[in-house]
Image: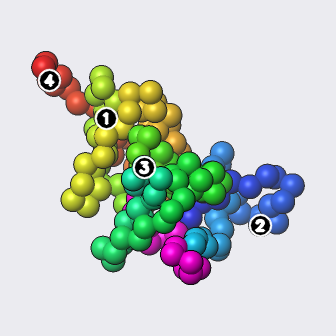
């Protein structure tokens, strides 16, 4: 699946335009500096980015992890135009292509990736749900069956 970029309407040269999301782009590599070297990372291979204080850990599809000395906020600004990447929590940026399931509750929600569970913060839950629905609509997937609410609330 190609990444979805949002670009200004004046710059778009392609006649194919997705509704309210952006245009499909062939630019799928991101250049990042790690330990004095420049590594090109394919955006389609990134599952998520995780914050570790002043460092960012990239979790890749092949199981490898890359550590960068940039903060997560810097990468969030670089990925702002890519609608596949969203920040559900202050510690993570997630690629929608690898989301298996979502559950929302009164405390925000949970996001299920391969073998990990990432919390969705209460403040970002509504925006996250809206962006995920747009992503599913643009990629042609069924919206109603993938997003569900937890019916049982746990009382602690």
SS label for mark 4: loop
Relative to 156, say whether 96 is above or below. below
Secondary structure, mark 3, is: loop
Q: Residue at x 47, y 53 (%)?
A: 54
| Of pointers 4 and 2, the one earlier in the residue sequence | 2
CB under 8 Å between discs 2 and 3: no
Specify the label residue 14 is tagged with: 2
Colour scheme shown = rainbow
Asked whether disc 3 touches disc 1, contact meaning CB atoms under 8 Å apart, the reply is no
Q: Earlier in the sequence, mark 4 or mark 3?
A: 3
Residue 53 marker: 3
**Is residue 43 found inside the magenta-colored segment of the image?**
yes
Q: Which mark is residue 119?
A: none
Dot 1: what SS?
Answer: strand
- Please provide the residue range marked out in magenta: 34-48
Of the numbered discs 2 and 3, the one sitting upstream in the chain is 2
Disc 4 or disc 2, which is closer to the eye? 4
Q: CA distance from mark 4 to mark 3?
A: 31 Å
Mark 2 to mark 1 CA distance (whole Å): 37 Å
**3 or 1: tag closer to the N-terminus:** 3
- State whether residue 2 appears in this view: no
Q: Position of residue 126 (x, y in %)?
A: 46, 30
Front: mark 2 or 1: 1
Separation of disc 3 and disc 1 at Cα?
Answer: 23 Å
Residue assigned mark 1: 109
């Amino acid at each position: 699946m190609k990444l979805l970029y949002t670009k200004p309407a004046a710059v778009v040269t392609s006649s194919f335009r997705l509704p309210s999301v952006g245009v499909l782009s062939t630019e799928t590599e991101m250049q990042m500096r790690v330990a004095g070297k420049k590594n090109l990372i394919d955006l389609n291979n990134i599952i998520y980015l995780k914050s570790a204080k002043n460092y960012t850990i990239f979790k890749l599809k092949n199981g490898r992890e890359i550590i960068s000395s940039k903060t997560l906020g810097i990468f969030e600004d670089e990925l702002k135009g890519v609608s596949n990447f969203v920040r559900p929590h202050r510690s993570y940026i997630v690629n929608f292509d690898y989301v298996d399931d979502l559950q929302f509750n009164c405390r925000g929600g949970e996001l299920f990736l391969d073998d990990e569970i990432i919390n969705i913060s209460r403040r970002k839950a509504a925006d996250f749900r809206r962006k995920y629905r747009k992503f599913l609509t643009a990629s042609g997937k069924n919206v109603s069956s993938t997003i569900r609410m937890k019916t049982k609330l746990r009382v602690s």
